[in-house]
Amino acid sequence: MKKLLFVLSLILMSIFIVSCGGDSNDKDSHPETVWVTLDLDGGECDYLEEFECEYGEEIDLQNDVTVEKEGFAFRGWYVGNKKAKFPYEVTEDVTFKARWAIIIGGSTETDTATDDGSDSEMDTSSDSDTSTDTSTSKPSDSSSDTSTDYVPPLLDHDTINYEAKYSKDGKKIYYGSYSFKVPVVTEYYNDLTAALSMTFDDGADLAAAQLASSIMSEYGLKGTLMVNTGNIQGNISKWQELVALGTLDIGSHGWAHKDPNTISASEMEHEIKDSYDFLQQYFPDENPVTYATPLSHLTEAYKQYLIDTGFIANRLEIYGSMIAPSTENPDLYQLYAKRIDTGNNVETNVRINVSDALSAGKWFIELFHNVRIKDGTDVSEEDFRNHCKWLYDNYKDTVWFASYDDVCKYIVQRQTATIEYTACDKESMTFLAKVDKDYGQEMTLKFYLPFFIDSAYAVVNGEEHYLTLEKGSNVRTAYLNTCVSEEGTEIKIYLGGNDKYYNNCTHDYQVNKVVNPTANSFGYTEMICKKEGCGNTYKSQFTDKVSEASVAQAVSEIETVDAIVSKKEDLE
């Protein structure tokens, strides 16, 4: 018995020793202190940039540390790509990086991971501080003296990062490394959600066309007369007067409605080329470039002749249910239209197709012949009026009512449009937009502007256009309707800031002081507003090294550039 008690005592003592040892190991499993590093990214602060604190200690950089960087707004402290939430419990060595948003010229969106530019909060139990910055600024080309070294295409719906630069007397001054979204041409005019076009074939009845135009104009609808040019040549002045009213424009349905499947080469030339030349001669202001093949037949040879002649699109027809085209990348030579006549009930068959297409963001094309009861291809005046009213009542605020010809021109221009971001300063941004072929069709350009502005207007070809801003958390969007030329159309957008950033002062700057560069810091020119009591200042840093461009501050006036270049020459 004593022996058994002795053995039990040994077991209990072993368990106690192991337990005590385990507590000791747990206590020693983490360090007593950890290190905190502040990466100011070119800014300044009123605190140590590296300090030691106890393991598990909670720190509050947001309230305890003041940071600033001339010309930039502080966005917050980040660990990797996540915004830190304070108080922050420090359980390992960690680096907090200051993120900044430039407040001169470009958008203040920084390289955060979220789409809308908003900061994403992070949990304080983050595993690591070793994440890398995801900014993808395009490297500068030191051999180039152009105003910007990255020219994005207009139709890229991405955020671009770039480093603009200015060159004077061989001295390269880099400035403005930041991000903003590329402007885009919206899919539909006025950024509406879908499009609807009416077309009227043959041109055999002027009075029917006049009636259709009168009814459509009451409801803001637009259409295209797809005429057999042989039908209208004997009364051309009346057709010109009708088109001049603006509700209907004009396109070709051939010369004499010949079947493309059985046509000869000479007849094809007459149908296509002669009808094109006729419309260009008698309707030069319309620049008619759209076609509708007779009988909805299309051969490869016929299609190629349309292209070679100068027609940019061709419409076919379908009688039953149809799938409406998208305007993103359509086959412009096989665009289908819904045929509407007395045998195709408007209120049931047609409206179902229209509703489905428009709610899906598509482009719906309607095909009529004459608006009056004459034969099986016609529609009654009552049915047509009711249909127009139904379209207006249900879609006037969301759908682009446009002619077939206008939508085709918009698509072609949009597909070839490009833009160059050419310049910025404290009060404006400048773009150069181009198209490969200008058909005179206005396009809607959507701009992404700095979040801090409260007004904007654009100057295009000497004309001012007030812009209505849609305000988001970190961006302002604005829309501009304008024509864009093949040579290039300059668009300059003037930005109006709020009190927080501009103090209601236009800021006429002068040099306040020049700070020489040292081995560890950049030199800069400090500019100050001349207006008494304003006190607004900013620094223009300078460097000759491309790799250091991302830390440079925007230079907004040529006098500033002169002062910097002059000072650099003195130092050298």
Image (cartoon, rainbow, N blue to C red):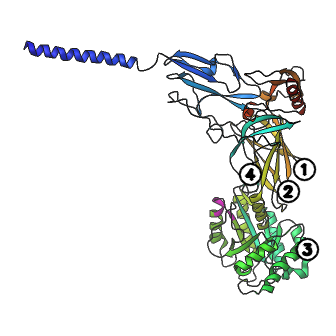
Distance in Å between CA atoms under marks 3 and 1: 29 Å
Please provide percent x and percent y for residue 237.
92, 75
Taking 122 as reference, is 402 above or below it? below
Neighbourhood count class around disc 1 (C-alpha, 10 Å): few under 14, some 14–19, many 20 upward: few
Q: Earlier in the sequence, mark 2 or mark 4?
A: 4
Q: Earlier in the sequence, mark 4 or mark 1?
A: 4
Please provide percent x and percent y for residue 14.
23, 17
Distance in Å between CA atoms under marks 4 and 3: 36 Å
Neighbourhood count class around disc 3 (C-alpha, 10 Å): few under 14, some 14–19, many 20 upward: few
Residue 529, quarter of the rendered image:
top right
Please provide percent x and percent y for residue 437.
82, 62
Viewer-side residue, 546 vs 248: 546
**Dot 2 lies on which element?**
loop
Amino acid type at image mark 3: Gln
Neighbourhood count class around disc 2 (C-alpha, 10 Å): few under 14, some 14–19, many 20 upward: some
Query: Which residue has dot 4 on it?
Result: 153
Q: Earlier in the sequence, mark 4 or mark 3?
A: 4
Question: The C terminus lies in which quarter of the figure?
Answer: top right
Query: Which residue has dot 1 on it?
Result: 461
Residue interval drawn in magenta: 357-363
Viewer-side residue, 382 vs 40: 40
**Dot 4 lies on which element?**
loop
Distance in Å between CA atoms under marks 1 and 2: 11 Å
